[in-house]
Image (cartoon, rainbow, N blue to C red):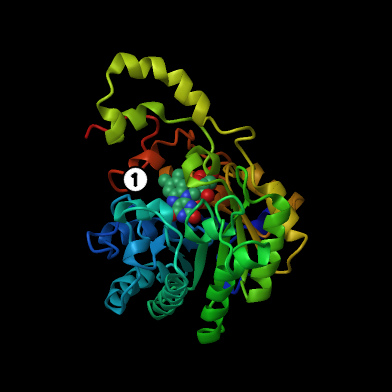
Amino acid sequence: MTPQESIFAPTTIGGVHVKNRVLRAATDESMGDANGFPTAQLTALYERLAKGEVGAIITGYIAVAEKGKSTFPGMCTLEADEKIPAYRTLTDAVHQYDTPIIAQIAHCGAQGATKYGKVCALKEVEIHTIIRQFIEAAKRASKAGFDGVELHCAHGYLLSEFLSPKKNKRCDKWGGSAENRFLIVGEIIRGIKAVLPQFPVWVKLNGTEKNGVTEDLAAEYATLMEQAGADAIEVSCGLSEDVFMFARGSVPFDMICHDYPVVKNVPKPLMKLMKPLVNRLLEPPAPKRLYNVSAAERIKAKVHVPVIVVGGIHDLPEIESVINEHGLDAVSLCRPLILEPTLVQKYKSGKQTEAKCIECNYCMIGISQRPLRCYYGKLPKD
Ligand SMILES: Cc1cc2nc3c(=O)[nH]c(=O)nc-3n(C[C@H](O)[C@H](O)[C@H](O)COP(=O)(O)O)c2cc1C
């Protein structure tokens, strides 16, 4: 097998039989109904991705509890058994193509809680409730036919807040040292493994973030995750408040003006003046491609479980370099697959070597108002 053929050959990653090493990264589709049930529109999207031969699908984040939902509309939830049949329909549809599907489970923490009032430190009893909610959500995911779960420990959501030395100011057993900050994640992983020993548990964590987790600390967390029983680690970076950090590219200023209620009413001439300033403030640093590879390599050197890297890995030569030269186990792609759900098939067949995504980042703003789609740098009509 040539190195390129080995990228597109079936293999096992973190207990999941993947079709190849190019995975669909978790992408908030905003396609849940008002009660958090997955819709036919979401199933159709996953079928397109499965037909397009992605190695596996990681779903957009699914809330483990009503209070863990994001402020964006259309987030799916997995907080009740009555949801299991709806998710079963979805996993059955994907499995028709022999494509595995992993449920990314999340709690949005302070980034969702603003909807419910003042943000404050969780009480001990609330922490235990959330741990239980994650474990229950994993049990439901297993019953619904998912091939595993991925804990969303990145991008500043609740578990990432616990891991961050900047955000976690707790003086009890849940803060103060790396082991303490990790405790909630450890309890969730161990809790899932206690009831479902064979069910794969992946973790997405930040390799770096502004004034928070560093590559060294991330490597320490990854070791603790492996010891707790995690089956694979996916490496990302950045916090939701620094949005264009984890999905680097252009700052979608015009789309922000179009979609965000707070800026909608600002007079146009003022916005024109503000544009260069906002662009400079939100502009992510270089590089805009392969920006998590160094953290992923650092983690790979410390753990035995597979390491997946996400973030600006879009063209075929980039995928090849990450796997063949940097020795990482798999890549995951988000934005390129929004525009081209069949991209992996195109790479595999040699039809194409570059993604058409222009990294305009309009998709990230658009999900605050309507279901996920690619805007290709053009403002929507609505
Ligand atoms: C529209 C959009 C939605 C996203 N939703 C999620 C999500 O639900 N969970 C998650 O872990 N990351 C999410 N991300 C981050 C991606 O998984 C990925 O880490 C990031 O976009 C970098 O990868 P890329 O360069 O392939 O886009 C989202 C990104 C975008 C652009």
In the rendered image, the quadrant that contains the N terminus is bottom right
**Most extreme residue toward the front, as rendered?**
171
Using the image, determine if residue 376 lies above or below residue 87: above
Q: Is residue 113 visible?
A: yes
Q: Is residue 66 above or below residue 209?
A: below
Relative vertical location of residue 118 with respect to residue 36 in this rendering, above or below = above
- Tell me how many marks there are: 1
Point 48% across, 68% down: residue: 100
Quarter in which the C terminus is drawn: top left
Q: Is mark 1 within 8 Å of ligand 1?
A: yes
The amino acid on which the numbered mark 1 sits, given as a three-letter code, is Ile
In the rendered image, the vertical position of residue 144 relative to residue 248, given as above or below: below
Of 277 and 97, nearer the camera is 277
Q: Label 1 belongs to which residue?
A: 367
User: Which residue is located at x 76 percent, y 50 percent?
Assistant: 325
Q: Secondary structure at mark 1?
A: loop
As drawn, is 140 to the left or to the right of 242?
A: left
> Horizontal placement of 340 versus 168: left or right?
left
In the figure, is residue 98 to the left or right of 198? Answer: left
Position of residue 60 measured from the top left corner of the image (x, y, whole percent): 42, 57
Residue 5, quarter of the rendered image: bottom right
Task: Please tell me which residue is depicted at 47% across the width and 67% down the height of the picture.
Answer: 102
Indicate the position of residue 40 as horizontal and vertical percent values. 26, 61
Which percent across, then down, holds residue 69?
A: 35, 59
Q: Position of residue 18 (x, y in %)?
A: 56, 67
Determine the residue positioned at 46% across, 67% down.
101
Q: Quadrant of residue 275?
A: top left
